Amino acid sequence: MSVTTKELVKHRREVADLQQRIKNRRLQVMGLYGTPIAALLTALAWPGLKIFFWLNANMPSAINYTLCGLLLFLVVATAAQVAAEFFLDPSPWRDDETPVKDLKLDLELAEEQRILEARRLTPPAPERQASYKERVPGEIARLRRESRHYRRVHLFMQWILFISSAAISAVTAWYDPPQPAKGVLIALGFTVTVITAAAGYFKPRERAFNLQQTADNMEQHATALDLGIAPYTEIDDKLNLASFATTVEALRAEQRMREQQLDQPQQGQQEVI
């Protein structure tokens, strides 16, 4: 690995580490302040339930035990977080007593330094294009993975629609009059309506098809480049790499445009088309 690559990787790791530290610190702060608030609300809810529901009777033991256990857990969690934040040395928390805004500032400075170093150490265009070619298989795998995800979501929605629609007819035919199954019919009708609306809004089938099509096109061009067949038949590999990078970026831009069109309402899609 060249010195240039090592420096760029070092800066990328520093940026990624700061991003993860910011996420961890946000969770720590949320727990530090949210846990005692939850304990206080639990303590207030206990007598509130007694007053509103069991004023002249004893509260069920199960509710008492549940609230007691929850309150005990929240108190212990609060004490542990306060100790980790202010009293333990060394603290199990990496950024104890560090505001999130300070970490964000460090991240901005690290990203700025990475940009400056990348500008100073940027390799020539042919090397960047060769590196880009090696990243394409990972992009193809990501597109296929997302395509499979949306395809599964679409199939799951369709099966729910099939089962719910069939169940509505079955329950209606089984009960005559349908009053005993009114709740079941309402639930099934609600499920069918929600799934139909969600499928029409999120369009998982169309997203899966677009992602799969883009992945197939990118894989076709990558294979053509490796085999040296049309449209990458130039003698100079630099020209082939430049043409390949241009084509793949055009495919990715077309995929992003399709995603934007799917996110627009039907009337907006017609106007775009």
Image (cartoon, helix red, strand yellow):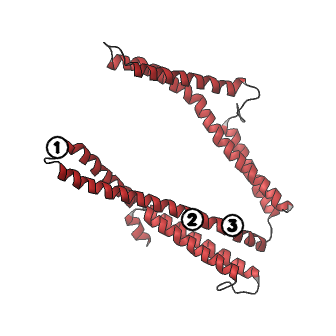
Query: Looking at the image, which residue is at 64% across and 25% down?
Result: 80
Distance between the alpha carbons at the discs numbered 3 and 2:
13 Å
- Which of pointers 3 and 1 indicates the residue nearer the eye? 1
Query: Looking at the image, which residue is at 67% across and 45% down?
Result: 20
Distance between the alpha carbons at the discs numbered 3 and 1:
61 Å
Query: Where residue 205 sits: x, y (%)?
Result: 43, 65
The answer to whether residue 13 is above or below residue 41 is below
Q: Which residue does the numbered mark 3 point to in the structure image?
A: 135
Element assignment for label 3: helix
Q: Residues within 10 Å of mark 1 (few under 14, many from 20)?
A: few
The answer to whether residue 196 is above or below residue 123 is above
In which quadrant of the rendered view does residue 227 lie? Answer: bottom right
In which quadrant of the rendered view does residue 57 lie? Answer: top left
Element assignment for label 2: helix
Q: Can residue 223 be seen in this view?
A: yes
Amino acid type at mark 1: Gln
Instruction: Point out the image quarter for the C terminus.
Output: bottom left
Q: Residue 179 carries which label?
A: 1
Query: Where residue 33 sits: x, y (%)?
Result: 58, 29
Q: Which mark is residue 143?
A: 2
- Residue 2 shown left or right of residue 217 in the figure: right
Query: Where residue 268 sits: x, y (%)?
Result: 41, 65
Distance between the alpha carbons at the discs numbered 1 and 2:
49 Å
Element assignment for label 1: helix
